[in-house]
Amino acid sequence: MTKNTLTTRNGERIAIVAGLRTPFAKQATAYHGVPAVDLGKIVVNELIKKHDLDPKIVDQLVFGQVVQMPEAPNIAREIVLGTGMSVHTDAYSVSRACATSFQSTVNVAESIMAGTVDVGIAGGADSSSVAPIGVSKKLAKTLLDLSKAKTFGQKFGLIKQLGLKDLLPVPPAVAEYSTGLSMGQTAEQMAKTHNISRADQDELAHRSHTLATENWAKGNLDGEVMTAHPEPYKLFIDKDNCIRENSVLEGYAKLRPVFDRKHGSVTAANSTPLTDGAAAILLMREGRAKELGYQPLGYIKSFGFAAIDVWEDMLMGPSYATPLALKRAGMELKDLDLIEMHEAFAAQALANMKMFGSKKFANEKLGQDHAIGDIDMSKFNVMGGSLAYGHPFAATGARLITQTLNELNRRGGGVGLTTACAAGGLGAAMIVETA
């Protein structure tokens, strides 16, 4: 154990006992019609069964969902009620956009640190295949007014005001509420501002798919990805279906830009696809884990959350959150054995990597006299990243944490950074270590 590790008041570390996820699937494929709450139940139930955990001893479950369904606003509580846990198990839901399961993991960890919880489960699930379809503002207002109208004339007058376009369904927004900009438009802005070339973006995407393919072939993901049998239970999925297993670098150049068709560089191939999936992490007080006979994957050393401007470089969160986590851990970037960064877009990942090594950025934005540090590519996303695996918004953080600890253990132990950008100008970072 290195210095500055998170502990309870009695000096016990926060153990990450295990992590598990469903295979991630492209929108409208393997999980077509399966809501996020069911994906959450699937993965938590399998986590409990796989590790022979008595569900009744789980004190708390914190789960998240970004694309929320109105009929199940507290996904965490629904998971508790659907997986055999005690009805008295504390459960609440969180949302921090693409860093949601970082937040749920930290919330459970803080409960353990406070001494109120010994055993907890954290995670997140999202379905882009089952999304809330709304109605226009005018139709919503009219429907409310109709419920209060008393005469036929009043009702007819209200209906007469509606046009055909007012009756059309409204899909979930893909743009930021505060700016009207999509994440892809922000990725384009970052590519232009920081001189990230199309060739570099395509190369990172190709690297991600190639490494993911290699690691699946080696069996390195078998222990952390379950086999899912979604309704109607006729088919199963046991592997991510977003990965380009025959990725060829030259093929990426054939795709046209999506968000700036004339001068852009962000394409469907160097961006994460809309994805369905769920991931969960089992956390315990170190002593409790030992009492129950578990050998933890590792421990939480530190974490940091950051919030930045949404109008420019909105996806630069890792470059702000990482220094916080490093400082709290008493470490420098060079001390890390692995670095796992969420690849929402190749442009976003490359821009953050560039800022990590920039003394100018550190001076002007972070108020420190030295750069965060140059990233050693032999340590960076060594199993591939979100560009290959896909990105169910609320599940990615838990994937990063579990994947990093498993790889550290395969390498004989060490310390790793996991970090992600998130919508709304948010960022998250967590440093984990093995025993």
Image: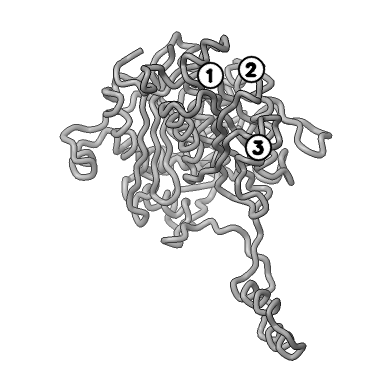
Residue 223 figure quarter: top right
The location of residue 52, given as percent across then percent down, is 66, 16
Displayed quadrant of residue 326: top left
Residue 17: which numbered mark, if any?
1
Residues tagged 1 and 2 counted as in contact (Cβ below 8 A): yes
Asked whether 206 or 428 is in front, the reply is: 428
- Between 60 and 129, the one nearer to me in the picture: 60
Which of marks 2 and 3 precedes in the sequence?
Answer: 2
User: In the image, is residue 76 above or below residue 375?
Assistant: below
Residue 135 image offset from top left, x and y in percent = 65, 67
| Residue found at x 37% / y 39% | 305
How many angstroms separate mark 1 from mark 3 (CA)? 20 Å
Where, quadrant-wise, is the N terminus in this rendering? top left
Up the image or down, 99 lies above or below 219; here it is below
Q: In the rendered image, which residue does mark 3 sit on?
A: 79
Real-space CA distance between mark 3 and mark 2, rounded to the nearest whole angstrom? 18 Å
Q: Name the spot of residue 332 as percent of width and height, x first.
A: 27, 24
Q: Residue at x 44, y 54 (%)?
A: 185
